[in-house]
Each structure stands twice: as C-alpha cells, then as structure tokens.
Image (tube, rainbow, N blue to C red):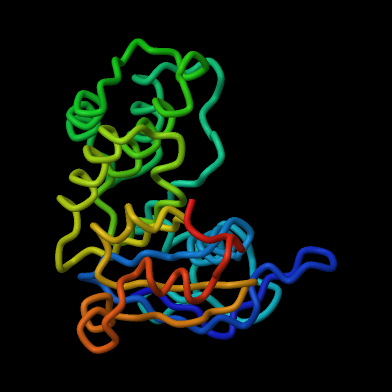
Amino acid sequence: MLESRAITKIFGSKTAVDHITLKLEKGHVYAMLGPNGSGKTTWMKMAAGLIKPTSGEALFEGAPVSIESRKHVAYMSTEPYFYSWMTVKDVGKYYDDFFLDFSYPRYQALIQRMELAENMKTTALSSGMMAKLKIAVTMARDAQVYMLDEPFNGIDLLARDEIRHCILEYATEEKLLLLSSHLVEEMEAIADRAVFIKNGRLIECVDVEEMRGERGISMADRYREIYGHGEGAMA
C-alpha cells in the first residue's frame, strides 16, 4: 500500500534518509523506531507527500505520492500546526472543511475521551493536551493510512493508555497504521511490525511475533542491539 524505493533526502551536507527501500502493507500496525535524528520524520514526510525526495520515490497503491494520495493519508506531525486564534472546536471545523473523510461527531467523541473541551484555546493547552488534540483530529479522519510521528511525546502514563486504546480501535484489516517513536515500551504493546532506522538507513523491517518466537528477543531487546549504550537507546 505504501512504499519507498531507494528514497533519499539530503539537506545541505546532511543525508537524512539514505536509499531506503521499504514496503508497508495494510492490516498492520508498524512501529518506526530509532533515536531522534535517525530519519524517521523525514521518511514519513516524504511518504505523506509533504516534502520531495532528493532521489528515489515514494508510492501509494503503486502510484507516486501526490495531492491525490494525500486525500487518503492522515499524517500527524510533531510540530504544532494550528493557528493561534483557534479553539479546540475551530480545529475540528477546520479539518471538517478541509478533509472529505473527516467526521466531526467522531472528533467530538475523541476530544471527550481525551478530556478536552471545545472552548479551550489552542494557545492555552499544555504540551500533553496539545498532543492529545493532534491525535484526536488525526484519528477523526477515515483515512486508509494513518502516520503518527512521536504520538506519545509529552503525554503522561494514563493518557498514553487512552491513546493506545484509541489507536488500536482503528487497526483494522483495511487500514495501515505507522507510528514513529523512540519510546520502545509503548510500541511493544501496539505494533505487530517493527521498522528500525539508524543514521538514515533501514536496518530491518520485522514481524514482531516472529522475532520473539524465532530469535527469542523482544522489540526492546532488538532496539538495544542496534543502538546500544546510550546511543539513542531507550529513554
């Protein structure tokens, strides 16, 4: 459903993504893992059609990503992207106007679960509340692909549980979910596939259950093997 072929992105003298070939299929929840600066966000933005690769290509359903494919991909970035004048309600109305697959009733149900009120100003939200708002407005779309960049950053333990349950509700055979994170423990309870990226290069994409059964190691164990001794190891 979503793939990259030898995709590369260079910013000045830095190669952020280095010839990554990767194919992701619907019906799975993928954890894209690696320390900050490993290339996760850059790969996701290219796959979402938000930035252009230096070389290689990103494909959605076999065709190059484009404005058309972006109608079917719900991407949540790490950066704040709401206007300062917006309330929580305004955010929902903005998305409702912009995306045909957005459900305002679903959004209302999600913000209620996240303990957010429609009259809250986005500028007054804490980092944790802002993270929950971004999750709610992204998951209120009926997209084919959901890409969430660091969805658990700045969120307390109880809120993480709620977000995890929310994400899993949308993990159907017809959907593809991709979550990037350096918080491996959170991904262990959600993902059935793990994508490890280091220094802009793909290390491997593995079936988590097969890795546990055949190699006798967990996602966290493999993370330690790849990144080791504080070099982006588990925080």
Q: Nearer the viewer, residue 37 or 220?
A: 220
Q: Is residue 80 above or below residue 205?
A: above
State which quadrant residue 135 falls in: top left
Residue 105 screen position, x and y as percent = 18, 30
Q: Nearer the viewer, residue 78 or 203?
A: 203
Residue 67 screen position, x and y as percent = 49, 59
Q: Is residue 203 above or below residue 128?
A: below
Q: Is residue 215 left or right of residue 53?
A: left
Q: How many marks?
A: 0
Residue 29 screen position, x and y as percent = 27, 65
Q: Nearer the viewer, residue 46 or 190?
A: 190
Q: Is residue 170 left or right of residue 235?
A: left
What residue lies at 25% left-to-right and 33% top-to-bottom? Answer: 158
What residue lies at 58% left-to-right and 85% top-to-bottom? Answer: 6
Residue 54 screen position, x and y as percent = 70, 74
Residue furthest toward the front? 229
Residue furthest toward the top? 119
Residue furthest toward the bottom? 214
Quadrant in the picture for the N terminus? bottom left
What residue lies at 20% left-to-right and 23% top-to-bottom? Answer: 112
Q: Is residue 202 left or right of residue 61?
A: right
Q: Nearer the viewer, residue 109 or 209?
A: 209
